Amino acid sequence: MIREAVVTSLDGAGRPHLAPLGLTGDAGRWIIAPFRPSTTLDNLRAVPFAVASYVDDARIFAGLVTGRRDWPLAPTEPGRPPRLAAALSHATLAVEHVEDHAERPRFLCRVESLVAHRPFEGMNRARAAVLEAAVLITRLRLLPREKIEREMDHLSIAIEKTAGPEEREAWSWLVEARERFYAPG
Ligand SMILES: Cc1cc2nc3c(=O)[nH]c(=O)nc-3n(C[C@H](O)[C@H](O)[C@H](O)COP(=O)(O)O)c2cc1C
């Protein structure tokens, strides 16, 4: 089971870094597995704590993969990274073990605390579509253009049918990033 979260980590100077990352559940632990190169990876080696923010605002996922990094933060426990202010809940994770790997090291984390902030008000297809498309946008260099366009065309059905203004805005950022990537010159 992989849970999509926005992970906050800290560099050696205590500066926070946000990244959307999949957390893999494994026997009561969560595994963070960033592909190299990754700021999150460097940070977890320097400061072995992470905070996973669980959010329902799709703009944060779309924003982070399209260069919009300025999302309000809120403090958590002392010495731990901050969470997203928009988090419905957050988990504080302590790195217990690192499995090194040339491409994708794995950080095995214990959950120190899990705190709820706001109610979750249900699934939404457009938000799920934004999440899928955000993953595609991080793979523009790796996947064929035809696959990216076909999959986004399909995902756009959920946007047309079920999005609110925030999901439409998130979607527009992703389409814009795709168009910029394929623009000639
Ligand atoms: C929903 C979602 C899940 C992602 N999961 C991962 C992941 O598990 N590992 C990874 O390396 N990148 C993942 N990415 C891509 C990263 O967010 C992106 O590469 C980011 O820049 C991480 O690198 P950083 O630590 O340098 O910020 C995911 C992106 C999205 C939108």
Image (cartoon, grey):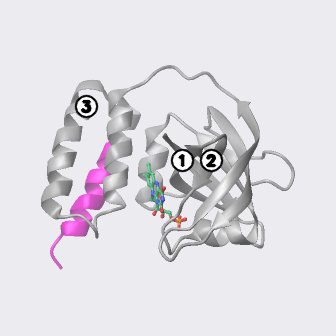
> Residue, x 38% and y 34% (percent of image)?
127
Q: What stretch is highlighted in magenta?
A: 170-185
> Residue, x 66% and y 40% (percent of image)?
28
Chief secondary structure of the magenta portion: helix
Relative image position of residue 85 (x, y in whole percent):
66, 41
Amino acid type of the residue tagged 3 in the rendering: Ala
What's the CA distance linking mark 1 and mark 3? 26 Å
Q: Estimate how packed mark 3 is, as few (under 14), some (14 to 19) or many (20 or more) residues with alpha carbons within 10 Å.
A: some
Give the residue number, with chain letter if any, for mark 1: 24
What's the CA distance linking mark 1 and mark 2? 5 Å
Q: State yes or no: Cβ of the residue under disc 1 lies below 8 Å from any atom of ligand 1.
A: yes
Which is closer to the viewer, label 1 or label 3?
1
Asked if residue 118 lies left or right of residue 137, the reply is right
Q: Quadrant of the C terminus?
A: bottom left
Give the residue number, with chain letter if any, for mark 2: 30
> Residue, x 24% and y 64% (percent of image)?
143
Amino acid type of the residue tagged 1 in the rendering: Thr
Relative image position of residue 21 (x, y in whole percent):
51, 53
Q: Do the residues labelled 1 and 3 touch (CB within 8 Å)?
A: no
Which residue lies most toward the right here? 78
Give the residue number, with chain letter if any, for mark 3: 158
Q: Quadrant of residue 169?
A: top left
Relative image position of residue 174 (x, y in whole percent):
32, 52
Q: State yes or no: Cβ of the residue under disc 3 lies below 8 Å from any atom of ligand 1.
A: no
Q: Are marks 1 and 2 in contact (CB under 8 Å)?
A: yes
Residue 93 visible in the snapshot: yes
Residue 72 visible in the snapshot: no
First in sequence: mark 1 vs mark 2: 1
First in sequence: mark 3 vs mark 2: 2
Under circle 1, the secondary element is: strand
